Amino acid sequence: QDTLKIGYVDPLSGGGASIGQIGMNQLNFIADEINAKGGVNGRKVEIVGYDNQTNPQISLVQVQKAIDEGIQVIVQGNGSSVAVAVSDFVTKYNDRNPGANVVHLNYAAIDPVLTNEKCSYWHFTWDASADIKMEALTNFIKEKEDLKKVYLIAQDYSFGHAVAGAAKRMLTEKRPDVEIVGEEYHPLVKITDFSPYVAKIQASGADTIITGNWGQDLALLIKAAGQAGLDVDWYTFYAGGAGAPTAIKQAGLENRVYQINEGINNQGYGPAEERAGALMQRFSDAPIYYPRMFNMMDMVFKAMVEAGSEDPGDFVPKLEGMKLDSFAAGDEGFMRADDHQFFQPLYISTLGALEEGQKFDEEHTGWGWKMAASVPTESTLLPTKCDMKRP
Amino acid sequence: MSATAKTPILELAGLRKSFGRMEIIRGVDLAVVQGERHAIIGPNGAGKSTLFHLVSGHLRPSAGAIRLRGESIEGLPPQSINRRGLSRSFQVTNIFPRLSVWENVRCATLWSLGHRYSFWRDVERLDDVTRRTEEILTEIDLIDRRRTPAGVLTYGEQRALEIGLTIAGHADVLLLDEPTAGMSHAETERVVALIRKVSEKRTLLMIEHDMQVVFDLADRISVLVYGEIIACDTPARIKANAAVQQAYLGTEAA
Amino acid sequence: MLEIIFVSTLNGVLYGMLLFLMASGLTVIFSMMGVLNLAHASFYMLGAFFGFEISRRLGFWPALVLAPVVVGLIGMAVERYGLRRVHRHGHVAELLFTFGLTFVIKEVVEMIWGKLPVDYRVPSGLDFAAFTLFSGNYPAFKLFGLLISVGIFIGLLMAVRHTRVGLIVQAALSHPGMVGMLGHNVDRIFMLVFGVGVGLAAVAGVIAGPILVTQSNMAGLLGPILFVVVVVGGLGSLGGALAASLLIGLVQTFAVAFNVSLADLFGGTAAGAILSVWLADIWRVTVAQIAPILPYLLLVMILIFRPRGLMGTRDT
Amino acid sequence: MTDARTLPRTDAIGGRRPGFLARHAVWIALALALLLLPYLFSSRLALSTMSMMGTMIIFALSYNMLLGQTGLLSFGHAVFFGLGGFFTVHVLNAAGSGDWPIPLPLFPVVGGLGGLAFGILFGWVATKRAGTAFAMITLGIGELVVSSALILRRFFGGEEGITTDRTDVMSFFGYGFGPQLQVYYLIAAWCFLSIAAMYAITRTPFGRIANAVRDNPQRTAFIGYDTSRVRFIAFSLSGLFAGIAGGLSVVNFEIVNAAQMGAVESGSVILMTYIGGVGNFAGPIIGAILVTWLQLILSDATQIWPLYVGLLFIGMVMFVPGGIAGLLAMQAPVMAARKLHRVVPFYLLALAPGIVALVGLSVLIETSHQFSIRASYGPQLTLYSIPLDATSPLPWVAGVVLAVAGGILFMRAERLARDAYHAAVAQGGQG
Amino acid sequence: MLEVRDLHAYYGKSHILQGVDLDVGENEIVSILGRNGVGRSTTLKAIMGDPEPRGEIRFRGTPVVGRKPHEIAHLGIGFVPEERAIFPTLTVEQNLLLGIKGGRRGGRWSLEETWKLFPQLKDRASAPGGALSGGEQQMLTICRTLMGDPDLIMIDEPTEGLAPQMVERIGELLQEIARRGISILLVEQRLVIAMRISHRVYVMGHGRIVFEGTPPELVANDAVRREWLEV
Ligand SMILES: Nc1ncnc2c1ncn2[C@@H]1O[C@H](COP(=O)(O)OP(=O)(O)OP(=O)(O)O)[C@@H](O)[C@H]1O
Ligand SMILES: Nc1ncnc2c1ncn2[C@@H]1O[C@H](COP(=O)(O)OP(=O)(O)OP(=O)(O)O)[C@@H](O)[C@H]1O
Ligand SMILES: CC(C)C[C@H](N)C(=O)O
Ligand SMILES: [Mg+2]
Ligand SMILES: [Mg+2]
């Protein structure tokens, strides 16, 4: 019997490769897990990588190639710019080729348009959208009395604007007293020296930075801040990898960098630790960067089994509304049928020296993520503007 | 000679050129008469090639006037001067090495036949161009080599092509810079014959060190020394001129 | 305001000198051999990784010496067995060769060190703030980098002025065969020049590695800007490269410091109302946002209005 | 009046110009090939691949107008490709929503006009200079446009670019251009037209003068031409065709983003043109087909495809500087002398060990890759459908042996082939 | 001093030199005459190693074939090419300094002496070589090679493009060079000069030596002159 092929369309070369590769590793690990249990509906799962070089147009070529090779399930995550293009392409493709039924599984692109204006029946996302994350983050910040001046710095593309915009909106609503002393957009993965930006932040007198930066744009920013001795708290989405933990440690920012995501390694939840441990044994230099990928694949496989078919045309309806005990701590999340957004508990954590009993450090720094707050699924629910066209 | 032939076709007046602090051309006045063959001789470094560069638009004069048929042309770019009917050859061979001999000559005929930058006409179908190219190639005796890339011609052939390029464009004033340099006697003779032929009905201004060639061809000779014309006269009188002898000819011609 | 000016100037100079450190080798190769070494930034990356690896084993100071030597030797091998052969096919060929080299070097680096950034740190001896200005720290290590740049500038200047190598290489650009017939071993000199050039890039790598990230994509970010420096400065002019580095460092740093946009300048006026519609796209773009394009703007302007570059002696 | 017709005409390279029939035979064959290809390769993958190739052929040929014909090395040619795309996409969107009566096949014209307009604008700046200065200006313009594009997000759509739906516009004789096959034919038609037009341009007075400028700009001025004007026209025209290619790319992918104007894209068109061969009109066509194909399959075949691309670059410039077309053109005298049977056996003799050496090299590369980056996936790898173990000495030894032995044999055979070639040419010359 | 036996050379596939034999003795001035394109320049270049020579060449007994041009130069052979190969971006003085091999000074020739020989060059000492007039370039290229202090100097068409009185000077210069114990292998178009200063002459035709003898012998040999020199 032939294998069930899943196409992974993400950067495997170029600037985005460092995070694309981590996703590839995790996906393969998950496939091996399920194959050890006999596969899905008796079919072995095979992950096929397609390098999109973080370029929307190349992504389309790669998706087309994947489809031509008989693949119906496309996993993609890195970059909202790519996700919008892929989702659009897949939707159009299904329209034009009746019975084609290709589905786009998104594990990281969180520009809110994907689940609002541009939502699609053939697109599902497991990462909380920028709005959801910012909502939770600002609820957390709201309580911080000593926070007075906030600086927003963001990558100059749709996702960065979404993050900064949401932060501005929500902060003015929740903490009218807080002053936003700066709002900075810098080009995506092009800056080598962030010192001028840091100097500007310094001059603004900010005590807090909120940023959605990822990859080297975060690592370099933190590094420059550390060198200049910038004394602020950081609220981030993506401080979990790609050199950021290393930079945080080098800058000595113990417990000053917060991260919001759907789970960390040191949550003390047995099943997760077991799987994380196994994964990190195999891929020693990369932590679990995408806990949601486990949620995603667990649900997809479940839907396939329930539908008794691996054709998205059959299993997509099963995904809608599906509930799952999420990977990181076993609390329940669900896939909202209205916009195909997965809602799950979110966690706010900080990076610092490992404490007793904490197993996982990050990037061999000896520091690890520690829980600062958790946000239950119910309080992450945001309304959607999605008007979903169903076939 | 008709009456119009006496009118100067090319006139230089008070022409000067300096490079940095060094003045190379120090006030040259010269009138080249329509239809004559005029030679410029002078010691090495006197400024002969520089003078050609000025006239042909390769360099801009520092001062002075250059008039072609009464219109002043100083400071114009080379192509504009060429379009007014003045064409030159170079002391160091200057051809299109990767193009075939045929293509070299054809390119040189295009502008004068009015084809300019046209990118909508098939060049092979331009019969006037084909005819003219063939004519020139026959004239410079390279018709059998027309498919050879110009870069692999022998030195002598390249010099002939150099002349071909100069005459292809229907210019009626020709400037030739040492056309026979580096040629053996036999070849020199051939080139002299060629020059004699192509300069009929045209005006020729020529730099040459080979005195035999100069005395053979020239109607008049100007002697340029240190950027100044010290004499301008018929060959016979130049030969006899003591100053010229001292400054240039030395013993060979004496 | 004063603070911004002071701090920006300082940051600009520091960044500019870092640029110069990287561009100096490129200037040497570009001006002497006429080779547009697109792989220059890759050698800079190699320098950073070798610097990391050697300082992990032997310490930073040996790395500062050894890494450039190793990279220089690699460069010489590349010249000897690759570039030399390509040289006679002209500049486009050379360029494509070095372009291909960037891929190879990157992939090899990834094979050895992976795609994730490595933990290359400022040596502990230099890991302190040299001084503090307006609440910002100035790390000693950056000042050390500055010192090295100045040293290299002076050293190179002396070398070019007082050695025949420069002459020979320049001569060989026009008539390589003749230089050989005059008794100079052009091949060996070219090899040396290339080795020294990329060795200088490696010095920059060893120093910039801890300041920026040491990662397999660090080369791609710097490549184009180095060309801008070399061209704006004027081909072959070390002084020009220095001036251009500083200029670009300062321009970029100062641009970042300003948040002025058209909206701020004309907003509220009658003309502003119209402009904001017509220029909707750039209406709210701040000077800070266009900082990264300024070097290229500078490059185009310079080439149009002063083709020799700031201090060049000949046309590019 | 006999001369113009009877005289054997010459080409720029000095070869004999093919006769009237032969010349048209090439075009008929090309048209037929374009028509029939989808029957030969009918998979969806093949169709989309061929559509891409068609686009890239136009793009590469337009680049060769600069590099090969006029001797201008541009580092920013993708700017026109991308701008052509952006203009097309905007007009397409406007036409789609406004029900303009323009059918899809006409939209590449919009791209062409956009490319031409900016070709004129940037050409006016860049072509004042030649040589390295020109190259650097184009580099600067390229970077400038790309970085500005990310700021001017209304027109360029930021990182994500602008998308469209080609089926929204007026249908064309009942064709809606949903299916890839229809798109293929649209691209093929434009490809044919563009190739023909660009070929025709090489044979015009302008085309020949462009060659002259490439060879010796100084002398060109002295035969009456303004060299910067020639460069300017070449630049604008190549912008036009690059824009058409960009428009076709939009029709094909329904998306365009700033990255398409970037250095990578500009580099890739240089690669196509050079690998194909700049000295020959057909070179860029071959290069575009080959490189597009490689770009598509390489990233599937191996994860470290950039390494192979790099080695390809290096290998080509070191060993085949004339490009593939150059290599083929070298066979023309042999063919003319009917001595092909003398040389082909030697070529095959050289090819065999050459392939062995390449296989050995790839075994080494893939094994080290498995050993290093993919270590966490275990030492097992499958190459050429043979399972190997990166930790055992076997693949390493085999790789080294194949590469070295193949390499040495190849060099021997290559020398033989070279001698055979020279012998054949020399005999041909005498015979 | 220089022995050449059965020298062959190719440009690509064309066989230019087809077995050239010639000798130059110590302190001798030897000329190669012949028509345009027979391969005289190629002979000199092949001795310098480019194009790659086949056959036997010995300089003071040392085999030359197979060496690189710079090694051959270090053996003591100097070469002045027909196309002059002035380094256009370097100044006149720098051009001259580059003639000195490996920084070794103190040969028979020095800058001062060059300036004395050609005062015109001294005036232009700091001008770029590319700006020199044709004749000035010719002087420069000869002096540049002399700066390398060769024992044998091979000069290709030294009087090309020179004004008549300059031609005289070059003739004197060559004799002066010979007086200092340097042998000369000369390729010259102007028979008058070559015949006057040479000890021996070779006539070349189609890649081979077709005549060898003293100038008077050549003058006497009408057949050779008519067939190979076209005078
Ligand atoms: N661009 C320049 N810069 C500086 N000096 C120059 C330049 N061009 C020419 N010269 C100088 O001007 C003088 C005249 O040069 P020109 O080439 O006109 O001489 P010429 O009379 O043609 O001599 P020849 O007969 O040797 O060719 C020379 O001394 C030369 O060095
Ligand atoms: N680089 C080259 N490539 C191909 N053929 C060449 C090359 N150089 C010279 N030749 C050919 O070799 C032959 C001999 O040339 P060479 O320069 O030795 O002649 P020569 O006797 O010095 O004549 P001249 O008086 O023209 O200098 C000529 O037919 C010439 O066309
Ligand atoms: C991989 C992620 C960091 C991508 C980012 N969240 C985006 O939406 O663009
Ligand atoms: Mg002259
Ligand atoms: Mg010669």
Image (cartoon, coloured by chain):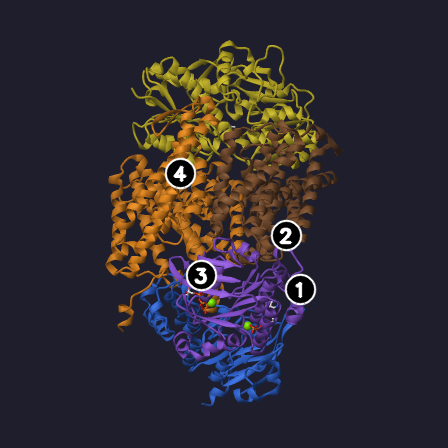
Chain colours: A yellow, B blue, C brown, D orange, E purple
Residue E83: x and y in percent read 51, 65
Residue A172: assigned label: none
Can you identify the residue that label 4 sits on? D295
Nearest-to-viewer mark from 2 and 1: 1
For the residues labelled 4 and 3, the Cα–Cα distance comes to: 56 Å
Give the residue type at disc 3: Arg
> Which amino acid type is marked by label 4?
Gln
- x, y (%) of residue D392? 43, 23
Mark 2 near mark 3, Cβ–Cβ under 8 Å?
no
Residue marked by disc 1 = E111
Residue that mark 3 sits on: E5
Crowdedness of circle 2 by 10 Å Cα count: few (<14), some, many (20+)? many
- CA distance separating discs 1 and 4: 60 Å
Please, what secondary structure does the residue beneath circle 2 have?
loop
Q: Amino acid at mark 1?
A: Leu
Mark 2, residue position: C237
Q: Residues at badges 2 and 1 in contact (C-beta under 8 Å)?
A: no
Give the vertical position of A246 relative to D237 (above or below).
above
Element under disc 3: strand
Residues at marks 2 and 1, CA–CA distance in whole angstroms: 28 Å
Q: CA distance from mark 3 to mark 1?
A: 36 Å
Marks 3 & 1 on one chain: yes
Disc 1: which chain?
E
